[in-house]
Image (cartoon, rainbow, N blue to C red):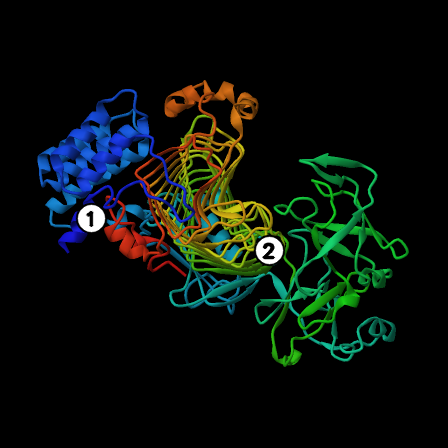
Amino acid sequence: MKRRLWSALCLLTILAVRVNAAGASLPSCCPPLDAAAKALAEKQFDAAATGFGAVAADASTPAFVRGLALLGSAQTATARRDAAAATAAWQRLAADATVPPLYRDIAQRQLAEAERRKQGLPGRDPAAYRVKLPSLPEPSVVLHVSPTGNDQNDGSESKPFRTVERARNAVRDLMRKSPLPRGGAKILIAGGEYSAREPLTLTTVDSGTAEAPVVYQAEPGQTPVFRGGVRVAGWKSIADAQMREKLDPSVRDRVLQADVKALGVTDLGDATDLRRRPELFVDGVPQTLARWPNEGFVKTGEILGADTFTQWGIQGCKDGKFQYVEDRPSRWLDEPDARLYGYWFWDWYEEYQKVSQIDAGARAFTLAKPYSNYGYRKDQRYYATNLFREIDSPGEWYLDRRTGVLYWLPPDGVDASKVETVLSVMDRPFITMSDVNHVTILGLTFQEGRGDAVHIARGADCLIAGCTLRRLGGDAIVIDGGLRHGIFGCTMDTLGCGGARVAGGDRKTLTPGGHFVENCTVSNISRLKRTYTPAVHLDGCGNRIAHNLFERMPSSAMRIEGNDHLIELNVVRNVVQESDDQGGIDMFGNPLYRGVVIRWNRWSDIVGGTHCGAAGIRLDDMISGITLHGNLFERCGAALFGGVQIHGGKENLVDGNVFIDCFAGVSFSRWGEKRWLESIEQFLPQANREPYATRYPDLAGIKKDADVSFISRNLFAHCQSVFLRDGGIEKAALNTVSDQSVDPRVVCEELLLSAPLPLDEMGPYEHPWRR
């Protein structure tokens, strides 16, 4: 136990510079700092204190090294059990505005934890890193809704309303007479199914206040389900002999049909347009729109378009015409609405295309406008879909929009009369909230819509909590503007697009939005739009993503744009499974996206990609000044990327992370001074103006030291490489390399950091509102 405590106090317990498995050594930008850290590890306290003090006093030392030296001084005093000296050292570090904010934050936390220990409490308080949710008061008004109710009732428990809209109107009627009394209003929604064809629309008049919120909540222990689809019944064998003959003989007698117009469905949508396309679900499982090949992709043949171009040495065309290689497409000449889905030029961007013509003689596709954004080239991945003739694999289906007939090949062993088949119909959000304040949606389920589930625009202090959002064609929740809106404890899965799109705060004034996504599980998303539809797309200023589990996604789990966001204590695994040149988290394209902190997250098994690869964290095209601290990377990186990939940015601080069994630790794609200066030119006016100049003092040197980032206190264990393409210009200090794999929990407790990684806090936690 003493050994563990001692090791936790040290900056490092082993020499900071070692030889990695590939035979290259990690350089240090400050050997005196390494010597002081080694002295501390060996309990040579006088030498450590002298060494750290000298480095901290050297004005020519880089700011991040000075921060490490001040941190080392405080830890030396702590190791000596000199509480007064340790407190003074932490206070000095906390007050030093010249060192990176990370080290000041560490000092502030150390001081706070010391105070807790004086009170006999554990130093670290997990609750300090959890959102403070509103405490819902005892309501003054309670209304009830039930699937067996009647909108002519009074909304009492014994005479509930039938619809939530009626309950909303009842609350409006009350508020027209006088403001809601303290405690507000609660609409209790009984379990069961509610057919949704129109959004529940909430506006300013439906707002509550902090003392009198309006809450739409599931009855305790019950599950209200709002469904945007229709059950498909009356399945029968195909009656039209000509249609039967188009199918493969092995399935002709097994494919079933149903008339969806007879079910009241008049809007048949589009085969592939997002938020308009219907889907077929069987016992909750999405079926496959008939396609070829049944799995995976084929490759484009020769490019035949006339509007050619060359980019990065790659030849392509802007007009969509190319040869197909296999014989199969020549069978589709009578298909009325064939679509192709492909990564047409880059493997990080895909889209659907309509087929205008198939020339069997030339073995060529001609696509309809609009063409793909990036053009087309040979040997790119694609597949064909919305093809009646390709109903040949169990679970495939097709909707003939000319006749309104739905065709389906049931999975093996499935009796169509004994399963629930649902066609999604509703193409608008289930709930829209515009300029609404203090409204909570709690414990509801939304499913089988063609579009998004919930939209919130502007307003303040609204909360979506404990909800399940699934089997949707769009995003689960969209928050656009406003202040302090939250998504908490929700389950989002089987989505056509992403989990949550959250934008809030003002980047011009750097005013925080205060939005949060916390304690949620998001999985199996981006089914219809495979790229740029992450679990959370975060934009604006001053928002937070924490304690979530994100898994099983074809591309990124998070895309972050803007300033001063906090990404912490999430678990991200098995993402970037199909696209290329992406990361578990992705940032792109603006050197003024500063103040973002990504700390204490667990990134596991992110090894996809085709050409460039996949990273745990990817800072792309000029992203600079980002702090990556205390993250655990397990089996991350592939092709050209490490667990962290930095492309063209600078002043990123990669500190105190653990890399285990990664393809590489940190990879770099350096731009050089010329490209850097040319690219940042458009951002310089804003960089020199307030509040940016004061909030981010490093912007004063934005033109200097292109490609230089700071890499400190990391452990690289059993990684194939430590750095890739660093060029020897990165500022590194106190990094440790081991050729052996390690147990992350042992590492966190004994080997590396001044405090263990909070592994037990990463990911979701128990809460009464969590689904």
Q: Residue at x 47, y 30 (%)?
A: 707
Secondary structure under tag 2 reads loop
Identify which amino acid the numbered label 1 is placed on: Ser
Q: CA distance from mark 2 to mark 1?
A: 48 Å
Can the viewer see residue 111?
Answer: no
Observer-nearest of 32 and 181: 32
Q: Residue at x 74, y 65 (%)?
A: 398
Residue 316 at x, y = what percent? 75, 40
Residue 151 to residue 415: above or below: above
Q: Is residue 275 left or right of residue 399?
A: left
Residue 378 at x, y = what percent? 74, 47
Residue 630 to residue 467: above or below: above
User: Which badge, 2 or 1, comes first in the chain's sequence?
Assistant: 1
Observer-nearest of 518 and 298: 298
Q: Which residue is outermost to the right?
A: 361
Query: In which image quadrant can residue 404 be found?
Result: bottom right
The N terminus sits in image quarter: bottom left
Can the viewer see residue 720?
Answer: yes
Q: How crowded is the residue under tag 1: few (<14 C-alpha within 10 Å), some, or many (20+)?
A: many
Discs 2, 1 touching: Cβ within 8 Å: no
Identify which amino acid the numbered label 2 is placed on: Gly
Of tags 2 and 1, the one toward the viewer is: 1
Query: Circle 2 sits on which residue?
Result: 496
Observer-nearest of 201 and 361: 361
Q: How many marks?
A: 2
Secondary structure under tag 1 reads helix
Q: How crowded is the residue under tag 2: few (<14 C-alpha within 10 Å), some, or many (20+)?
A: many
Query: In which image quadrant can residue 58 be found?
Result: top left
Q: Is residue 136 left or right of residue 346?
A: left
Residue 689 to residue 5: above or below: above
Query: Circle 1 sits on which residue?
Result: 7
Residue 146 at x, y = what percent? 48, 66
